[in-house]
Amino acid sequence: MRRALFIFGVALSLPATAQARDYGQRGTVFPVVERDLLEQIQSRLTNMEASGETARLNEELKRRTLARVERPAPVAGIARASESRSWLFDPTIALQQDIRGARGELIHAAGTRVNPLDSVALRADLLFLDGDDAEQLAWALGQQGQPKLILVSGAPLQLMRARQRRFYFDQQGTLTAHFGITAIPARVRQQGRQLEVSEIALSTKAEADQ
């Protein structure tokens, strides 16, 4: 305790010059002249608004969006079928988690293999085609049973207006990849507890009538 008091007393007795000194200015000092980032952004937006650039960009975005809706990006890797082939597709899946009812009762446990066709039948055939190919379009529209028409290329809205039929689009190739389809036109239809997938070459009338 005495030692601490002694050190404290010595510190108090030191002259002020020993505690703090002014070492003066070292080097050149420049004022801060950089504009605030938010201020720059606001200024840029104001100038764009005044020049009409904002309106032009908005119109361009609108045009591109409408164009993409009218004509989505074609599905990559899909060719016109040069030969016909068919295979069976099993839609059975293994559940990743428990399926429970509204009151919490267990319907299917995780890991259970379930075939959706046991509960819900495929109501209509699925036809995949190029909407810009007149031959494929005529083939698809000539099929019986009101199949679902799914484009991998073309303008679905334009075709709906012209043909008074509903057209779908395989966005990003999700369905064709799922079924393993690489050539069109193609058909998916139910065969019992499986799906039959067919790629159809339209080189002869007999094949076109399939």
Image (cartoon, grey):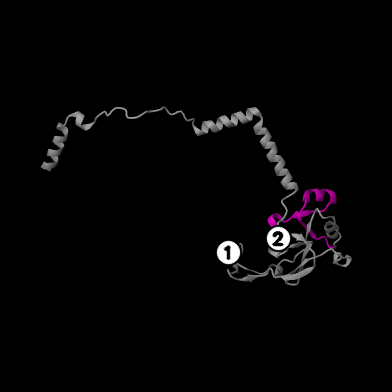
Residue topped by disc 1 = 104
Q: Tell me the tag on residue 175.
A: 2
Nearest the eye: 189 or 204: 204
Report helix, strand or loop for mark 1: loop
On residue 176, the disc is none
Within 10 Å of disc 2 (Cα), the crowding (few <14, some 14-19, many 20+) is some
- Between the residue at mark 2 and the residue at mark 1, the CA separation in whole angstroms equals 32 Å
Secondary element under disc 2, as helix, strand or loop, is: helix
Q: Is residue 138 visible?
A: yes
Q: Return the x and y of residue 64 as percentages of the image width and height.
A: 70, 42
The residue stretch that appears in magenta: 144-173
- Whether residue 49 sits left or right of residue 81 in the image: it is left
Are the residues at dot 2 and dot 1 in contact (C-beta closer than 8 Å)? Answer: no
Q: Earlier in the sequence, mark 2 or mark 1?
A: 1
Residue at x 80%, y 48% (from the top left corner): 158
| Amino acid type assigned to the residue bearing label 2 in the image | Leu
Q: In the rendered structure, does residue 168 fall within the stretch colored magenta?
A: yes
Against 109, residue 128 (above or below) is: above
Considering the image in quadrants, where does the C terminus appear?
bottom right
- Quadrant in the rendering for residue 192: bottom right
Q: Which quadrant of the view contains residue 167?
A: bottom right
Along the horizontal axis of the image, is 11 left or right of 52? left
Residue extending farthest bottom: 192
Q: Residue at x 24, y 29 (%)?
A: 21
x and y, in percent, of residue 94 in the image: 62, 69
Q: Is residue 124 visible?
A: no
Work out whether residue 177 or residue 91 is closer to the camera in this orientation and state it: 177
Left or right of 115 in this view: 185 = right
